Image (cartoon, rainbow, N blue to C red):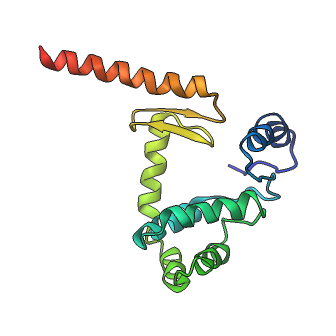
Amino acid sequence: MPTLDPQGEYLTRVWRTSVYPLAERFGVPMKLPPVQPRSRLAHEAAQWAETQSNFDDYNAAVFRSFFERGEDIGEREVLMRIASDLQLDAVPLGRALQEGEFAASVLADERAAEELGVTGVPAFVANRRAALSGVQTVNALLALVNSLRVAGAKQELAADY
């Protein structure tokens, strides 16, 4: 399936009506990236960063790279530069990406997301049992969490009998 056109009606409308207002509200600098890359390599790189005990910093740097600077996070060289900027040795990352060291794990995550009904980003997953795709209101997120609390309470009651 082709990626979405960054200048197309859908993305420009969603960013104008949802993303930009939310980003402004929270003081997060964002701009619609000029590219819509495949993100699988970025996910593989994030898993590599986790093995370096640097997942959070790396993930934040990837988001800044994409949403603030519009860089193509589907490119191995971009991901390696991000690692270098964080004082990580980018050579092992490049090798891991080249050899697909984390590909199977990322594909398993994709299958799990599909089973939960994730159809887009952002996605909110609760307890690996339920998910919402797309920009959501606080009320929708609370409803998701509460529905799982209720379901969990019912399971606990059933187990007691």
Q: Position of residue 114 (x, y in %)?
A: 49, 40
Q: Residue at x 58, y 64 (%)?
A: 42
Q: Position of residue 152 (x, y in %)?
A: 31, 24
Q: Position of residue 32 (x, y in %)?
A: 81, 51
Q: Residue at x 48, y 42 (%)?
A: 113
* Viewer-nearest residue: 86 or 100: 86
Q: In the displayed structure, would residue 77 be above or below residue 13?
A: below
Q: Quadrant of residue 16?
A: top right
Left or right: 93 in relation to 154? right
Left or right: 14 in relation to 133? right
Q: In the displayed structure, would residue 112 be above or below residue 97?
A: above
Left or right: 60 in relation to 3? left
Number of dots carrying numbers: 0
Q: Quadrant of residue 51?
A: bottom left
Identify the image quadrant of the C terminus. Answer: top left
* Viewer-nearest residue: 44 or 16: 16
Q: Residue at x 67, y 74 (%)?
A: 78
Name, please, the residue furthest toward the left. Answer: 161
Q: Residue at x 52, y 74 (%)?
A: 97
Q: Position of residue 138 (x, y in %)?
A: 60, 28
